[in-house]
Amino acid sequence: FENHEAALTSWDACVTELKRAFMNQHRRQRAEDLLQARTQGPNETVTSFVEDILRLSSRADPQATDEKKLRFLMRGVKSEIFGGLIRNPPTTVEEFVAEATNIERAL
């Protein structure tokens, strides 16, 4: 309030700002929860899975590092693809996509 006192000229403005602040926090938490539980579906392509993980990651934590995104990708990818990736673990999201796509094609 003290930092934004001049901007809050009415009760309606205050309510709007409070909703915006807490909605964003709620949206980020929801994205984080979905990200924690996200796994690749049985008929889902690597491309679709990666796009969804990256979308959720940007909502949950816009400053997420490649390392953090990679942890979510490795944890949620299908076990048969994970088995191929673990032999030579990728160090970037791009490496993950390239290698996981190659493994997917071979299956």
Image: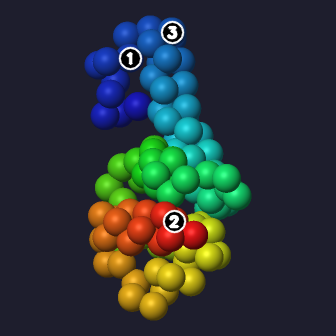
Report whether residue 106 is seen.
yes
Q: Residue at x 51, y 65 (%)?
A: 104
Q: Residue at x 56, y 83 (%)?
A: 83
Vertically, is 59 above or below 45? above
Vertically, is 21 above or below 101? above
Crowding near the residue tagged with mark 1, few <14, some 14–19, many ≥20 C-alpha atoms within 10 Å? some
Front one among 106 and 81: 106
**Gap between marks 2 and 1, in whole Å?**
54 Å
**Gap between marks 1 and 3, in whole Å?**
8 Å
**Gap between marks 3 and 2, in whole Å?**
53 Å
Q: Residue at x 39, y 88 (%)?
A: 88
Front one among 95 and 103: 103
Q: Residue 96 appears at what percent x and percent y? A: 38, 69
Residue position marked by numbered label 2 in the rendering: 104
Q: Which is more foreground, mark 2 or mark 1?
A: 2
Front one among 75 and 45: 45
Crowding near the residue tagged with mark 2, few <14, some 14–19, many ≥20 C-alpha atoms within 10 Å? some
Q: Which mark is residue 96?
A: none
Crowding near the residue tagged with mark 3, few <14, some 14–19, many ≥20 C-alpha atoms within 10 Å? few
Report whether residue 32 is seen.
no
Residue position marked by numbered label 1 in the rendering: 8
Q: Amino acid at mark 2?
A: Glu
Residue position marked by numbered label 3 in the rendering: 12
**Viewport quadrant of the C terminus:** bottom right
Q: Earlier in the sequence, mark 2 or mark 1?
A: 1
Q: Residue 11 appears at what percent x and percent y? A: 51, 11
Vertically, is 66 above or below 6? below
